[in-house]
Each structure stands twice: as C-alpha cells, then as structure tokens.
Image: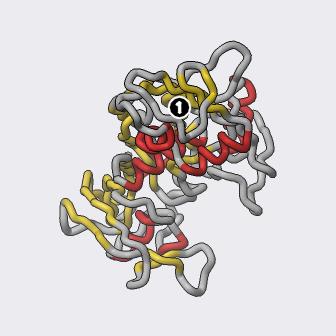
Amino acid sequence: MSHLLPMNSGTDSRFTMQFIATQDGQLLREALQEWSISKRALTSIKFGGGLLTVNGIEQNVRYPLSQGDLVTVKFPLEERSEGLVVEHGNLEIVYEDEALLILNKPPYQSTIPSREHPTKSVANFVCGYFQQQNVASTVHIVTRLDRDTSGLLCIAKHAHIHHLTGLAQRKRDISRQYEAIVHGHLAQDYQTIQMPIGRKESSIIEREVRADGQFAHTDVTVLQRFWLEDEPMTYVRLKLHTGRTHQIRVHMAFIGHPLVGDELYGGSRQHIGRQALHCVSLEMMQPLTKQALHVTSRLADDIQRLLL
C-alpha cells in the first residue's frame, strides 16, 4: 500500500487523497478498503458529490487496478451540523496540520453545545475558526473533555480523518495522560484500575462501577503526597487505556480517592470550583503521515495553586 498526502487543486475545495496501487488486478473497491476508506465514505462519495478516478479517469469500484496506477479520491464537501452555530472566540491552538487541530481547553467550557450551554462551546468556536481559514469541514471531536476538565482536546478536520482516528482509538493507539489532585493519601505509588463502568440507574449523568458496565482501564501514578490546610491530598498522573465517560472520576472515587472539586463523585469544592483534572499529554500517530505525534500541556493555573 502506498499513499500520498491530501491535496486540493484549483478552486476544488473537496478533501482529496491520492494513492498508488501496488497490485495488478486488484479491484478498486478492495484497494480502497485496504486504504481504510470506509463503506460509509464510499456511499457518500457515490451519492454526495465525490469522485473516484484512476490516472485521471473516473472509474467505479469494480475497476481492476494495475500496479502503479494513481487513484484519486475526492470526498464530498462537508456541511456543518444542524444547530451548530458559528461563533468566534479564543482558541488556544497547541498543534495544527492538514488533518488535526489540537487545542488546550480551559475549564468551564463545553466541548460541544448542550441544552444547558448552547453557545460558546469549543465546537462553536472551531466552526468560526474553520470559516476564517476556509476549511470546508464540520467539527469532528476525537478526544472529548468534560466541561470542567481542562487540557488537550483533539479535533479531526474531516470525516475520513475522524474515521482513521476512530480506528486508532479502537486499537488503543491513542494515548492520553492526565494529572489530577485527589482527596487523601494513596497508599501505593502505582496501581492499575480495571473496573467496568456503566450509567447509574438513578441518573442520566452519573456513572458508576458496575458488573454490566463497559471495560475501563486506568493507570495511576503518585507524583506527590501533600497536605492542604490539614487535609491530605495526592497529586497523581493518570493514563487512560479506554475512554469511558467520567472514567477517571469514577475510578478514583471507587478506590476512595475522589478528585478534589468533583462534587458529583464525592469531592469537595472548598479549594477549587471544579474537578482538579487536566489532560497533560496526547500521543498518537499522525493519521496520514504515520509520524509519531506527542503534544503536552502545562497544568492549569487553578490546579497549580493547590500545589503551592
């Protein structure tokens, strides 16, 4: 398999990828599958204004390829999701290329609009940024953060990129690390928590460890044990191997050390007005170039103050 980087030519702003065939007689459909073009994308290309060409000539998916053929895939133009209002606001961009946008999200900002917070979300502001940059895309969230969690958040610039990052997540090829302050002094310097998480029956928001939940795996490393106004606290680094809703918050509460500020799961807001949780590191392969990508973020100021 061989592929080239995305390219756009002239006034055609459709997201375009090019591949070089490596086998004689392979059907275009089979080659596209090897190149991780999803069936959903092929349907969208066929009926939504996309285009498949081999050596510049339009072909259907039953076309037999020859080694060295240049296959061009033009994806249809994307439309912004209904109800996603374009807004312009501050985005702290940590990394950007033709496929990805990685931001440092502040606390108290939603990743996507909700009934309670319909505007000023990351997604609203990214729509405005894409409009300014003439990026023909809607917002595809790769790694979401809770409203009160700060730190690194990854966005794909196209549905196909989102598909590729989804495949990487399922193979656990995207690694995220967080830092947090929790109540109490953890006894062990390192521990791994593998407990299933599911929705609590009495709540539409709260999760809990439960036997019929989804597998969830968190590694916990102690960075510092300290006291704040006679209260024991521990500064920890957490590595997510899975991405369940509220995973870190649920796992830490389950072992008796809820996050400071996390009232939903037993924490106190005496010293901070939100859960003391920040995504400090994101490691992944760039989905097109396959180059290793490692992005970091400094711990948010309100959490830093707890350590002073």
Q: Nearer the viewer, residue 125 or 189?
A: 125
Name the residue nearer the viewer: 175 or 71: 71
The residue lying at 46 percent from left, 56 percent from top is: 276
Q: How many marks?
A: 1
In the rendered image, residue 262, in percent from the top left (x then y), is placed at 50, 66
Q: Give the class, few, some or many, for how many residues have Cα within 10 Å of label 1's Cα (few <14, many ≥20).
A: some
Residue at screen point 79% across, 50% down:
82
Front in this rendered view, residue 179 or 44: 44
Report x, y in % for residue 44. Answer: 67, 45
Q: Residue furthest top?
A: 10
Residue 79 point in image, percent of width and height: 75, 41
Quadrant in which residue 147 is drawn = bottom right
Q: Is residue 14 above or below residue 103?
A: above
User: In the rendered structure, which amino acid carries the disc numbered 1?
Assistant: Ala
Left or right of 125? Residue 220 is: left
Tell me the SS state at disc 1.
Answer: loop
On the picture, is 223 further left or further right than 78? Answer: left
Q: Position of residue 234 (x, y in %)?
A: 31, 60
Q: Image quarter for residue 128?
A: top right
Please name the residue shown 73% across and 16% down the image: 11
User: Which residue is labeled 1 in the image?
Assistant: 99
Picture quarter with the N terminus: top left
Is residue 301 shown to the viewer in this render? no
Q: Which scheme is used to colour this image of the protein?
A: secondary structure
Tell me which residue sits at (69%, 13%) in the image: 10
Q: Is residue 186 left or right of residue 293?
A: left
- Residue 234, visible in the rendered structure: yes
Residue 268 to residue 290: above or below: below
